[in-house]
Amino acid sequence: MFIPEVKSQKDEDICILIRVENHSHNYICECGEAKSLTVKECQNTKAIFISHTHIDHFVNFDTILRHQIGGNQRVIICGPTDITKQVQSRIQSYRWNLITKDAITYEIREIQSNGTIKRAELKPPLWEITPIEDMAGSSVFENDLFEVSYTILDHKTDTIAYLFKGKDTTKIDLQKGDFKGGKWVRDLKTAFETNDPTCEIIIEDTIYKAADLFHLINVKKGQKLGVIMDHAASVANHKNILETFTNADQVFIESFYKVEDKEGAMANYHSYSSESGRIMRACNVQDATPVHFSRKYNETDINELLQEFESAYRG
């Protein structure tokens, strides 16, 4: 369902583009430098997910803004506390006297440590912050195909890790019975999805209880895709990661340092190769990919880092 692509090179800041099968919009995680991120990909982006606003995760926002402005669309930006003011400050640093008020609308969803999500709108030409109704719950974004939940990690500042989860789909296997298709198929799916086993299902003038037909239903679980950026390799952070990402299908996780530099990782509230690999193994993630490496490393260093991650991940 999800088709992720790391748009940044190993020596660039992190940026991940997520496409969705049979869906016209893109989704961007992190606004680090990424020269391969195209104009069209920016224009088709419906939502942007920012872990935190250190420069290597936010510096490329201006480029995305430049390509989206004038598209007359509503784009959602999700991120940690204070991101609303930071987005506003970035935008207001430019002059907008030739831009119409409907050129674009940014809806900012600011994730608070108390579990609420503050929402506000920014519109040209003044880009004033207009509060709108807050959200509650573990989901920061949702549409008909998937939802995005989150957990807050510690990087000496709040950093948000995101989990994209495709919605479960139900299909009727007609080969398991002697029935032909018809309106009853939709009725049975609705009864199953709303947990209504006593619902009456009419098939060719015969009335059945929904529960008696549930054996015809196949459920396909939605794919789980995680993005975990900068975080200290701490017990508290690993607890949150385990609670959110266990049994995920695919996860991209920061592995900023090699094992020999783990003291630097601890001092800078980063993870390092073997700890990122270990927590992915503990989460039983099917496909874990280390990303976001220190710029001090050359190609040989990065290859060593990848080997350390792989060894811990595969056990």
Image (cartoon, helix red, strand yellow):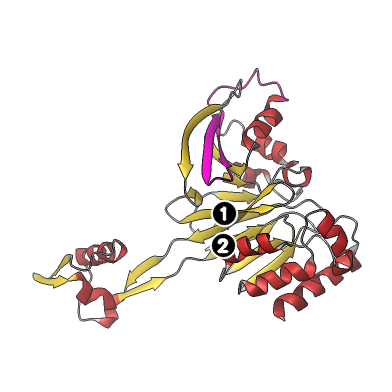
Q: Can see residue 22? A: yes
Marks 2 and 1: CB-CB under 8 Å? yes
**Which residue does the image show at 45% across and 50% down from the upper left?**
143
Q: Quadrant of residue 84?
A: top right
Q: Nearer the viewer, residue 150 or 115?
A: 115
**Which residue does the image show at 68% across and 70% down from the upper left?**
279
- Please state if 134 lies on the left or on the right of 207 as rendered: right
- Kindly identify the amino acid type of the residue bearing the numbered disc 2: Thr
Q: Can see residue 180? A: no
Q: Which residue is mark 2?
A: 244
Looking at marks 2 and 1 on the same chain, the residue that comes earlier in the sequence is marked by 1
Q: Which residue is mark 1?
A: 150
- Residue 10 sits inside the magenta stretch: no
- Kindly identify the amino acid type of the residue bearing the numbered disc 1: Tyr
Q: Secondary structure at mark 1?
A: strand
Q: Give the image location of residue 104, x and y in percent.
A: 56, 31
